[in-house]
Image (tube, grey):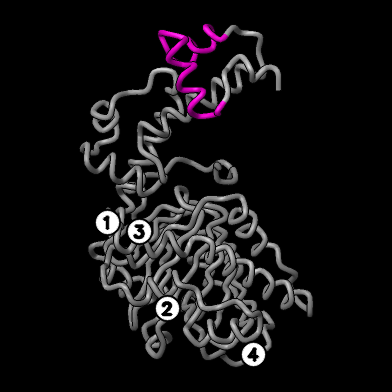
Amino acid sequence: MKKLKKPASSEMTRSDIRPSVAGDMESFDDVDTFRQRIHAEHSAPGFDVFDLGLFAPPDGMAADGTAMHMGFNPRLLSGELQVFRPYAGVVVCTMDFTANDAEALHQISKSLISSQRAVSVRLFHLGKILFRFGQQTYDSEELLGLASHVPLGDHFDYRVRKGERVQLTNIIITEEGEREIWHRLGIPPCPLFDALRTNEDPAFLAQPLPNTEAFQLLAASFMHLPRSGFAQNALLRLKLGELLCLLGEVDTAAHNALAEYVPFSEVRKLSQARAILNESSEHPPSIAELGAMVGLNRRKLTEGFKKVFGDTVAGYALELRMRKGYQLLRETNLSVAEVAEQCGYEHANNFTLAFRRRFATRPSQVRQI
């Protein structure tokens, strides 16, 4: 399943993302110094509307979920931020903005989240953002979304290049909010959230969301809610319930990941390995060759592939060949020997044996179905 296609934007690397007000900063190492400086230089009211830990609603924000519309400091951002509070302990923020400065930071204020532990779910819809959580950096163009723990008094940082348009939704849910959702919608607390809150391993404070069509459509729908009225609040609550139901489907895998965690940097390499197999199903590389191509040793490649994709490297490669063979048999007039050759088999008998083990029928019988 591929991520929904985004409008074309210029290519950008980590070294391209540098703040004009903080000098030549290529990493997040001196982000605290930069934050202090940019707050001093851009002190106009409006910059801190990026503080999203609004568990106690500010003046003008109704507790019944009515949206609060806010603008941005025009020196930094152009666009709109909508903040919804559908339930006590739940804040939903939809953001649609373009960065006017060389860099914009997103910080959840310590003072606003110091009282409760929470989980944040970010759904990326448009634009390129480099997002730092702890010591890990994530790229929105490689993720559909991210669920993360919100440690007491901690913060997050986004990096956005000047001129980049960004659309994303940030959903912050406290333990109180989960209980409220359980009471109102009958959706029990999410085990993934418990895992994120209680796990002490810094590597598992954030979890990329599965890139499925259901999550893709949900991410887009949050950006197109009605601007006001009863329908807005009703739809928002339905979408929130849908999100928690989808997260519930991956809870078991998330719990298993606590014991069998694969770092995100390795997941990216494993995804590259799977893509290579997809493109070379006829003659797949060996384990050693594949590992060298993506920069993983044999153990990390074989064990990580099984954990992430639920199949061995050899099993996945075989499945690709079998599916290709089945498709050729159904859609072409090629002989079994020719199909076997196109699937990478020198001998048709070997192809027939593998095919029978996989589909419990002979290749010649497929055309009779």
Query: Helix or strand or loop: what does disc 2 sit on?
Result: loop
Of residues 45 and 97, the one drawn nearer to the viewer in this rendering: 97
Q: Front-most of 35 and 365?
A: 365
Q: Please report the residue visible at 63 percent of the width from the left and 72 percent of the height from the top.
A: 241
Q: Position of residue 53 (x, y in %)?
A: 47, 81
What SS does tag 3 mark?
A: loop
Viewer-closest of 216 and 82: 216
For discs 4 and 3, the disc positioned in front in the rendered view: 4
Q: Is residue 163 visible?
A: no
Answer whether residue 36 is magenta in the image: no
Which numbered marker is on residue 19?
3
Tag of residue 27 = 1
Q: Secondary structure at mark 4?
A: loop
359 inside magenta stretch: yes
Which residue occupies 71% across, 67% down? 225
User: Which portion, as a residue range, is magenta?
Assistant: 336-360
Q: Neighbour class for label 3 at 10 Å: few (<14), some, many (≥20)?
A: many
Residue carrying label 2:
43
**In which quadrant will I find the N terminus?**
top right
Residue topped by disc 4: 63
Camera-nearest label, 4 or 2 = 4
Q: Residue at x 48, y 66 (%)?
A: 76
* Amino acid tagged 1: Ser
